[in-house]
Image (spheres, rainbow, N blue to C red):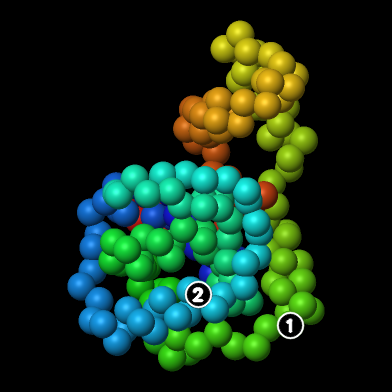
Amino acid sequence: MIYLIDGMSKPITFYVLTEKYIETNKFNYDEFYKKKLNSFFENAFLMNIVMSHDKCIICNDDIPEQGATSTDGFWEWSTCLFHYVSHHNIRIPKPFEEYLIEKDFKIGKYSKESLVQFREETKQYEIDWELYEDEFECFLKNNDISYKELLNSGDDEKYLKLENEFIRSTKKKVFLSYDLTKVNYIEYS
């Protein structure tokens, strides 16, 4: 899944592009438009770095930092969105597209202070991590898996697989540290 956050809306709005959407929503960008779009993504600020690799669901290429996010100080998005737009012409959500057109695809000057302010404004939507971890630990226990052993195993792939099962089974809506039940949530599928 690919996530985008509109940090200008109140409350903030999360957009989720599901695998089904990614596989089926291609757009015929003209060359000039796509060049501007790619330039925007290339010049964005890397907000959260996640040292991971995942495979593209379309071409099976490695996508470095699959869980990382980028920002222009007003919107934040999964960094892998750049891969899907530049290599596979995935249609970006209309509100994000309208925002980019309005800005003429330019990244404004952002300062450390503005990025901190963006993070502070979105902080109020964070999830209660203690509760989340307790619920995840109960999920593992119900499946005869020790949380402590899983953490100590260093098997990140298994951990992520189990966490995704947990999220699906509880219908939790979590992005990074955000509780999506506190925000506007729009899913493209």
Residue 58, given in percent of the width and then of the height, sits at: 29, 49
Image disc number at residue 111: 1
| Looking at the image, residue 157 lies above or below residue 115 | above
Dot 2 falls on a residue whose secondary structure is helix
Residue 10 seen in the current view: no
* Amino acid type at image mark 1: Ser
Estimate how packed mark 2 is, as few (under 14), some (14 to 19) or many (20 or more) residues with alpha carbons within 10 Å: some
Q: Secondary structure at mark 1?
A: loop
Residue at 73% x, 59% y is 124
Q: Residue at x 54, y 78 (%)?
A: 43
Given residues 110 and 168, the one toward you in this image is: 110
Residue projecting furthest to the left: 28
| Crowding at mark 1 (Cα within 10 Å: few <14, some 14-19, many 20+) | few
Nearer to the camera, 176 or 153: 153
Identify whether 55 is placed above or below 140.
Answer: below
Q: Position of residue 161 (x, y in %)?
A: 51, 29
* Structural distance between the alpha carbons of marks 1 and 2: 17 Å
Residue labelled with disc 2: 42
